[in-house]
Image (cartoon, rainbow, N blue to C red):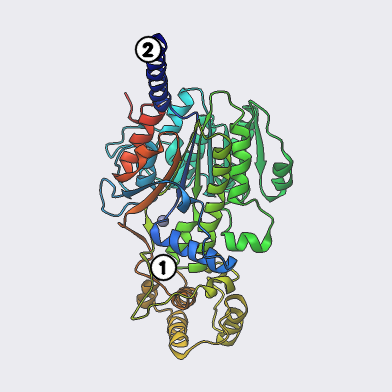
Amino acid sequence: MFSFNRSVIAASLTLASLSAAAAQPPKHIIYLIGDGMATSHRQVAEYYLQQKTGDQTQRLAMNSLPVAGINTTHSADSLITDSAASATALAAGVKTNNGMVGMLPDGSKVTTLLEGAKAQGKATGLVTSTRLTHATPAAFVAKNIGRGNENAIADAYARANVTYVAGGGYRHFISGDQSKRQDGRNLVTDMQAADYHTFIGGDSVNNFRSYQPQAGDKVFAAFTPSHLPYELDRQQSNTLPSLAELTEKGIELLAKDQDGFFLMIEGGRIDHAAHANDIASTVYDTLAFDAAVQKALDFYHKNPNDTLIVVTGDHETGGMGMGFGKHYFMSLEQIQTSQESIEDKLQGVYSGNRGAFYQHIAGQFNLGNLASDEKLLIERAMDAVDNQDKQVGTDYGGYDPVAIAVAHVTSKRAGVYWTSYAHTATQLPLSAIGVQADKLGGFKDNTEVALTLADIMNVKIGKQG
Ligand SMILES: [Zn+2]
């Protein structure tokens, strides 16, 4: 009888400690945001992976997480958000107007998840493949009425004391000829004075790669004047670190903090590729982002009891459709034969010499065998360029019409269609794994994602004061 009672007490104690353990906030939070990435981007990348490997069971790392949600993304002033308003929602749990970072529409400042984690003594990190001053990472540290005020956003980084910062865009941190800063200030020197290890420009890549993080270190790395290259172009030149490399180094450093860490990683160029309707770059940058998700998962598998990983997007870009016309097929070989990005490498290549251009795309995009309708699409764009036809030019989203015509040919060959050169209001998939991850599932607005995370982390976010 006595022993029976004891076991009942033991059992109830175990239950109590279990539920207490379940309510413990995760020590480590890794928040991955694919800019412009929605269901189609994720799925085409997965189908491409399966085709490339010849293994139909291959999954994206992010598509294999146990918790799934669907998120709406509208901003305070539009059903279609921009990255500034959506990042502010994901960082601080509030709706704001398109273009604003870290602020409510009335201009009052908000506290973010990163700032809340910092106040708890956690190490913090921001990683992106765009300029660090671009909207998504900016919303976690800066408060600005306009996302375009990137020098002021750089100032915010210099004050924010984030433990690990890595991406592109040093032009906003240093003054000079190649810079966007003309006030004579050098924020990199300021950060060095504040004990940052700094890695600036392509010449610093080797030092970055050999750098061994020590507890208490702070890192600021910006390898390019503007965005890091599209993954397709990065792989060709192979001189700059991948998003996964930046993520791995960041986790290595941040995990040395006894209080744990909060790390946000943005796959920023998925959005740019989709704006330019470039299917190959969209897929390659989604896969580069997924490789960063895998680095986060590798850490999770070593620390499953105190880690939370959340993967989401900020909005859909391109109105990307899988399939078009009256066809029931996708043919992703075309993605494999594209050698370069449309936006950074093909714009401006056509300058009146049609033969030279056709030769170029035969080599770089495997388009040596254009069908008559494909050729018509490209010729029409060439006519617009030759005639400097501004009216027709606007049909191509403000891009070089000929580059966009090629993007549409390669997309159609793959079986992909685009309805927009901008963002859409389409809902986003969210995936999560780890401590209290189940709370993030279900149908939520993007502000609820951040508010749920704040609740899980036990931090206060949103309007200050
Ligand atoms: Zn965008």
Q: CA distance from mark 2 to mark 1?
A: 76 Å
> Image height check: is 217 above or below 130?
above
Hey, which quadrant is residue 106 in on the image? top left
Regarding residue 175, the answer to whether it shows in the image is no
Name the quarter where the C terminus is drawn: top left
Q: Which residue corresponds to the image point at 58% horizontal and 45% vertical from the top-left? A: 295
Count of marks overlaid on the render? 2
- Which residue is at a point 61% across and 79% down the rendered structure image? 360
- Type of amino acid under label 1: Gly
Label 1: which residue?
A: 398
Determine the secondary structure under disc 2. Answer: helix
Question: Mark 2 = which residue?
Answer: 5
Which element type, helix, strand or loop, lies under badge 1? Answer: loop
The residue closer to the viewer here, 312 or 375, is: 312
Left or right: residue 32 versus residue 77 is: right
Q: Which residue is drawn at the image coordinates 46% and 53% (left, top)?
A: 63
In the rendered image, is residue 232 in sight? yes
| Amino acid on which disc 2 is placed | Asn
Residue 308 pos. (x, y %): 47, 36
